């Protein structure tokens, strides 16, 4: 479970950027975060995975507060429990898509189940480009590969920042629907930032930015 | 293979050009100072060894260092000055001083005529004096017979019984006058010295090539009045190939003491004879007696100065390269900042990225070191001679 209590964050002390009194995300829940650009959606995701630290308040992951953790402990948390998909795409340019997909598992000393990986990639339509390097793939293929990596990762939480923004509208919903099905099967929790209003029907729970004084809806 | 190694190898495979350039720079940074220092050391060793094994050298007064390098290390001069034994008659008059005559101005050509090597024309004593043994064939006993150095034989693929031509006396000697065909009668055992890369022949060959000796069928002169010998001589043959059929016809119209030499190795029996020869050389207007050890020391001190300048230049170039590589490394970090961020976002330990870069540099250094070793092996096993080393240092 992810819990936020009296969270306040700002890039400069005088001007609070995010202020959230309370938010609970239960295991297996899928939440969409909506809002205009620059309203703090991506910053909230970065706070949740410990890449940013709140000015005050608490974020608890499975009842463990993030703020008192050391940098190393937060990294460990990201490696094992929170898989973060950034807006810029997070594939390493020097590795092929397949190597990128299996890299986090390798770092965890886990061997990837290739059958599962191939099946997942086939469903996402990137099986043909698995051995290519990111620069030879389209933005959509790269996003699908990042999503596939999140799906095969053993972490229970996925924090995704507009993971389907480079896909065509029809492909976007199909991909998201498939990803949500897999997450349901694996009982993964998803917190996703999106601009795609058509996809909102797939999410039973939504929160809207700006987060100033917003409460759980 | 762990994550860092995987990242390092993937980066190198994706940036082969960059990896090659860095490795080549590192190879040169390792090779150039090592090459310079070892060349100087080798040069010093070879020059000193040869000087220690040569008591005194008598040569025309034209620069002691030049004469020494020419006659001891066969670094050929364009136009060596010649002298005759008569010029040094008073040095030997009444003295048991022994000497080995040398004529070193001609060259031989490879079979295809593109390469040249020195042709040392000397007395049979030279082989004994330098302890040169024949590995196959025999010693040269007659004009136009040669023994050839082991490395030269290998490089030029020369075998016993082959014929090699002498080169024209001067570069612009378009007539190619008196080009002789020399018969390879022996191949020398390898010595590691400069004789590995030359050919040795009796002195008479040099004089025949100069046109001072020639042959013509004797019967042509039979019954011909002496006054008509000149017309007969106009038919003389500057035999291109001297063999056992025409060898006997070769003759010189001057006594050998008037035929030219370019140097003599003097063999004083004791210190008194040595000092006498040196003193004689000091007073002679056209000839000088060279003490190889003292002249070599002078050459070496100049070489050390040159070496110091070279090393200083190399140091500056190396430091500049290191600074550039440091800047390059920094730019590399900046360009790969996003990679580091991705790993950070995935929670992969920070040292993974740092270790990957360390592995990359280890591979660059290993590749650079390997290239430097290959270059060094070309250098060591190529067996550079003094002439080649001097050429390398001059360039």
Image (spheres, coloured by chain):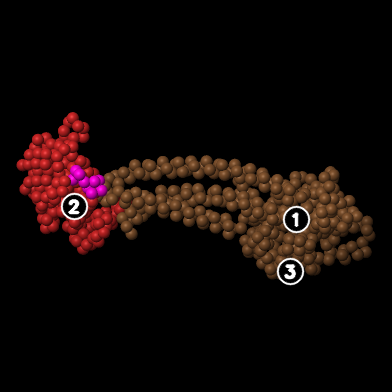
Chain colours: A red, B brown
Which span of residues is magenta-colored?
A66-74
The numbered dot on residue A54 is none
Depth check, mark 2 against mark 3: the one in front is: 2
**Does residue A142 appear to the left or right of B290 in the view shown?**
left
Q: Which is more N-terminal, label 3 or label 1?
A: 1
Residue that badge 3 annotates: B138
Which residue appears at 18% of the width and 52% of the height?
Answer: A81
Question: Where residue A185 sits: x, y (%)?
Answer: 11, 58
Is B381 covered by the magenta stretch? no
**Does residue B255 appear to the left or right of A54 in the view shown?**
right
Using the rendered image, report if marks 2 and 1 lie on a common chain: no
Which residue appears at 71% of the width and 66% of the height?
Answer: B133
Mark 1 secondary-structure assignment = loop
Query: Do residues under tags 2 and 1 come within 8 Å of each other at their CB atoms?
Result: no
Which residue appears at 14% of the width and 42% of the height?
Answer: A58
The quadrant in which the N terminus of chain B is found is bottom left
Question: Where residue B382 sits: x, y (%)?
Answer: 59, 58
Residue that badge 2 annotates: A81
């Amino acid at each position: 479970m992810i819990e936020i209590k009296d969270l306040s964050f700002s890039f400069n002390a005088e001007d609070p950027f995010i202020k959230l009194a309370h938010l609970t995300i239960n295991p297996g829940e899928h939440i969409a975060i909506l809002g205009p650009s620059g309203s703090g959606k991506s910053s909230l995701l970065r706070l949740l995975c410990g890449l940013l630290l709140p000015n005050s308040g608490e974020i608890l992951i499975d009842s463990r507060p993030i703020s008192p953790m050391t940098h190393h402990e937060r990294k460990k948390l990201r490696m094992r429990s929170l898989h973060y998909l950034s807006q810029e795409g997070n594939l390493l340019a020097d590795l092929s898509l397949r190597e990128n997909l299996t890299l986090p598992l390798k770092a965890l000393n886990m061997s990837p189940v290739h059958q599962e990986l191939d099946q997942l990639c086939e469903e996402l339509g990137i099986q043909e480009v698995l051995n290519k390097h990111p620069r030879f793939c389209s933005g959509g293929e790269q996003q699908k590969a990042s999503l596939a990596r999140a799906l095969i990762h053993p972490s229970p939480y996925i924090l995704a920042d507009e993971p389907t923004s480079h896909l065509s509208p029809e492909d976007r919903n199909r991909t998201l629907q498939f990803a949500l099905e897999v997450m349901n099967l694996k009982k993964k929790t998803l917190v996703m930032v999106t601009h795609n209003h058509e996809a909102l029907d797939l999410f039973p729970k939504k929160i809207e930015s700006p987060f100033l004084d917003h409460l759980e809806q | 293979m762990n994550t860092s190694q995987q990242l390092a190898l993937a980066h190198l495979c994706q940036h082969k050009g960059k990896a090659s350039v860095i490795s080549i720079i590192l190879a040169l940074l390792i090779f150039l100072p090592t090459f310079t220092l070892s060349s100087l050391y080798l040069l010093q060793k070879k020059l000193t060894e040869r000087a220690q094994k040569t008591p005194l050298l008598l040569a025309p007064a034209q620069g002691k260092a030049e004469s020494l390098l020419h006659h001891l290390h066969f670094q050929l001069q364009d136009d060596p000055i010649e002298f005759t034994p008569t010029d040094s008659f008073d040095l030997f008059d009444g003295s048991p001083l022994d000497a080995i005559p040398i004529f070193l101005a001609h060259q031989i050509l490879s079979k295809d005529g593109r390469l040249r090597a020195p042709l040392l024309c000397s007395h049979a004593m030279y082989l004994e004096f330098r302890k040169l043994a024949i590995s196959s064939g025999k010693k040269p006993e007659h004009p136009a017979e040669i023994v050839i150095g082991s490395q030269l034989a290998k490089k030029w693929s020369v075998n016993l019984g082959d014929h090699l031509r002498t080169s024209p006396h001067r570069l612009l000697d378009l007539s190619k006058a008196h080009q002789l065909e020399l018969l390879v009668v022996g191949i020398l055992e390898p010595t590691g010295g400069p004789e590995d890369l030359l050919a040795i022949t009796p002195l008479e060959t040099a004089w025949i090539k100069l046109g001072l000796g020639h042959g013509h069928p004797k019967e042509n002169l039979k019954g011909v009045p002496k006054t008509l010998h000149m017309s007969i001589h106009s038919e003389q043959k500057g035999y291109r190939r001297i063999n056992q059929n025409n060898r006997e016809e070769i003759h010189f119209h001057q006594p050998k003491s008037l035929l030219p030499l370019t140097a003599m190795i003097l063999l004083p029996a004791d210190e008194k004879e040595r000092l006498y020869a040196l003193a004689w050389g000091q007073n002679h207007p056209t000839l000088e007696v060279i003490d190889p050890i003292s002249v070599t020391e002078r050459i070496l001190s100049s070489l050390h100065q040159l070496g110091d300048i070279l090393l200083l230049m190399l140091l500056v170039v190396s430091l500049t390269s290191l600074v550039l590589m440091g800047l390059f490394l920094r730019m590399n970090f900046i360009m790969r900042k996003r990679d580091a961020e991705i790993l950070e976002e995935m929670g992969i330990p920070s040292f993974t990225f740092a270790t990957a870069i360390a592995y990359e540099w280890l591979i660059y250094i290993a590749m650079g070191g390997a290239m430097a070793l290959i270059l060094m092996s070309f250098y060591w096993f190529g067996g550079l001679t003094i002439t080649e080393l001097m050429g390398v240092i001059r360039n």
